[in-house]
Amino acid sequence: MTRLKRLLAPLLAVSLVAGAVQAQAEQRTLRVYNWFDYITPQTLVDFQKDSQVKLIYDIFDTNEALEAKLLTGNSGYDVVVPSNVFLAKQIEAGVFQPLDRSKLPNWQHLDPALMKLIEANDPGNQFAVPYMYGTVLIGFNPAKVKAVLGDAAPVDSWDLIFKEENLAKLKQCGVAVLDSPSEILPLALKYLGLDPNSNKPDDYKKAEALLLKIRPYITYFHSSKYMADIANGDICVAVGYSGSFSQAANRAREANNGVVVDMRLPKEGAPIWFDMLAIPKNAANSADAHVFINYLLRPEVIAPISDFVGYPNPNKDATAKVSPAIRNNPNLYPTPEAMSTLYTLKPLARDAERARTRAWTRIKSGT
């Protein structure tokens, strides 16, 4: 019996260790909070198979909604996806933990030029990894816009939106605008010849006045609803995110509903933004948060996501794997000439932030 015990003891130990590992694997849960319709379902399935991590995946549709959760100090998430301007404010507020580069070997695939741009919001690229990037531009239904404004409709200019005589006519077929003061008010400032990152409260009064003139002709403000509505033909113009219109065009084609969705990056320029993968300081599972981020840095993983969401990604080794329809579209992957007209947004001083928030409240209510 003693000899039998000696023989069985190692087997029992291996069994106990295996059971403990299995139990630990079963307990590994990662909570991710990302933008609406911003990843392929297959990516989530494949990650769980690859990592054996249970994924809880929730969505939001505005930076403000994400920030409200983060600033409570206990978001309940392990990976979140703020845009670069909000990231900068949140870094200052101590919301995130620094990334451990040793756990991110796929960092090598990131485009150094884009990483340099992001340092304006994340010095030293310490706290976040870029996921996708894009611009705010104009999406439209060519047939409906032509029916209202004729062949000379200025679809390649912010005049389409900010000139009252144009929007007054477009009202009949529906106009949507992002519910995002941090992106729409800078557009108005730039259109007026002012600094889109102005810290002068009086400048926001001027932008507010411009937007209040066109407010009666805006159907609604929302940061995701416009995608389905323009694909279905329920609206004819929207100010939204570049990749959203790529998705909407695909949906219309798949539905074979006769709707065409097109987009233009206006010649006057637009904000360029980056959505960033970051780990909250209070994350319960920062180890698997790094595993998830490193997984998304694989060129063969991120390229199909770009195809699905219609946005360029910052992975230099993935570009060739992205569909030509995406990577060769100058409204999605801006040309060098267009890049010179784009501008990054920055956090505002407190007084300017308050002025912008008050202006947006009045704009949305139309008062």
Image: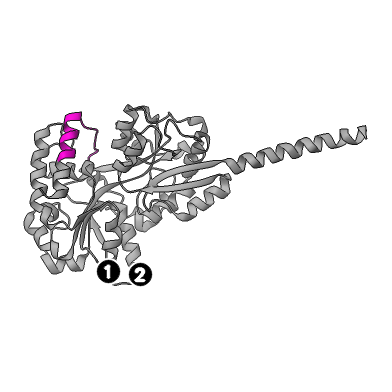
Magenta-colored stretch includes residue 355? yes
Q: Is residue 327 shown above or below 283?
A: below
| Residue at x 83% of width, y 34% of height | 9
Q: Position of residue 359 (x, y in %)?
A: 14, 41
Magenta-colored stretch includes residue 305? no
Q: Quadrant of residue 16?
A: top right
Q: Secondary structure at mark 2?
A: helix
Q: Position of residue 204 (x, y in %)?
A: 12, 38
Specify the amino acid type for callout 2: Ala
The reply to whether dot 1 and dot 2 touch (C-beta < 8 Å) is: yes
In this view, the residue in front, 79 or 58, is 58
| Residue at x 45% of width, y 40% of height | 109
Specify the amino acid type for callout 1: Val
Which residue position holds label 2? 255
User: Number of labelled discs?
Assistant: 2
Instruction: Give the extent of the magenta segment.
Output: 342-358
In this view, the residue in front, 87 or 194, is 87
Horizontally, residue 303 falls left or right of residue 90, namely right
Separation of marks 1 and 2 at Cα, in angstroms: 9 Å
Horizontally, residue 62 falls left or right of residue 194, namely right
Identify the disc placed on residue 277: none
| Residue at x 8% of width, y 34% of height | 202
Which residue position holds label 1? 259
Can you say which quadrant of the picture contains the N terminus?
top right
Q: Position of residue 241 (x, y in %)?
A: 28, 51
In this view, the residue in front, 71 or 102, is 71
Q: Position of residue 27 (x, y in %)?
A: 58, 41
Q: Is residue 16 visible?
A: yes
